[in-house]
Amino acid sequence: MELKSRQHTVSDLAGAMELCYTKGWTDGLPVVPPTEKRVRAMLEAAALEPQRELAFIENRQVSVSAEKVAINAVMAGCKAEYMPVVVAAVEALGDPLYGYHGPATSTGGSAVFMLVNGPIARELDINCGDNLFGPGWRANATIGRAVRLIMRNVIGTLPGELDRSSLGHGGKYTYCIAENEAESPWPPLHATRGFRRDQNAVTIFAALAPHQFSNGLSSTPEGVLTTACAHMRISAGSGRQPQYALVFAGEHMAIMKKAGWRREDVQRYCFEHAKSPVAELKRNHIMSGEVTPEDEHAMYAVVESPQDFLVIAAGGRAGVQSAFIPGWGGRRGSRSVTREIRRP
């Protein structure tokens, strides 16, 4: 395997790290120097030739090669066995359905949310429980970070240049979780998207920050979801997003399981109850136009169809908190994409 990337000579580890800062190759945190040995180990873990194209970003006319992905995975601190997950996520980035250019360049400030399903999530110890979106798990932190470094260093998505985000959020460092398949009331998310339970897959989603909501008063799915819908209506953004992720943690998950609610039941309930009168959206300057008498009774949902809610089981067992995550863009915004994680 011949590596074609330019090589740099430095005196020591500190010099290598400072070179990366000087060249603008970091996300603000120190990176692991991508030595030839480490890069080759990444490529071997995914059985990839260095020049294999993994994605082509149309609007940027950029080809993302396996070698460049491996370099950035090393820099992010990934173990070699994480490489197939990173590869699948990068392949998904190039899917026209995801539409890389919009969420990557918008002032809206989305990040690449990643959900890992299948046996690989447990083998790599990708967190699906306590402190779900927080620090402390190498796989979560480095896999998500690798994708952001690839966006920066290979595709050129630099803050203030191609990335015009007004505010951004912490998920731009890393936004990777696994689903709690063992305790979930529902089939794994990837099994609803054409994959078998025993297959490994990653779903990417151009997403805003997670919005946490609490409900310790209800013992029924209707009660929990009424709270979720109230919060979604309040933070409706532009009035409608392409998709929402709904992440239910332990106690809320248990309520759904006890009541026998399927994923489809959750989707339908939220679609019907996360609606606002058009008049309210116009008065709050979320939707343009003068308020008409008809607007008082016309209802507007936060998504176009029940299937646009991605219902996920994850988070700590204790506590009465769950979350919803709005997608990026209006009704024609980016869509979630699922790719198989292939291992040699």
Image: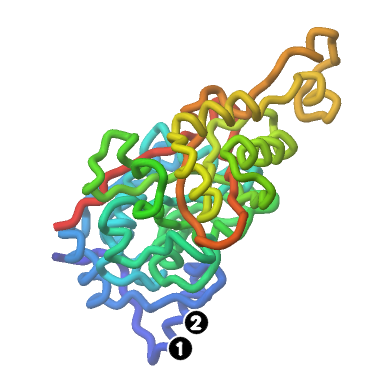
Given residues 292 and 105, the one toward you in this image is 292
Residue 187 in sight: yes
Name the spot of residue 112 as percent of width and height, x first: 49, 50
- Circle on res. 331: none
Q: Which residue is mark 1?
A: 14
Amino acid at circle 1: Ala
- Circle on res. 18: 2
Given residues 223 and 278, the one toward you in this image is 223
Amino acid at circle 2: Glu
Query: Farthest residue in the top direction?
Result: 294
Q: Is residue 174 above or below residue 195?
A: below
Q: CA distance from mark 2 to mark 1?
A: 6 Å
Report the quarter where the C terminus lies. Answer: bottom left
Residue at 61% across, 35% down? 222
Dot 1: what SS? Answer: helix
Structural crowding at the residue carrying mark 2, measured as other residues with C-alpha within 10 Å and reported as few (<14), some (14–19) or many (≥20): some
Q: Quadrant of residue 71?
A: bottom left
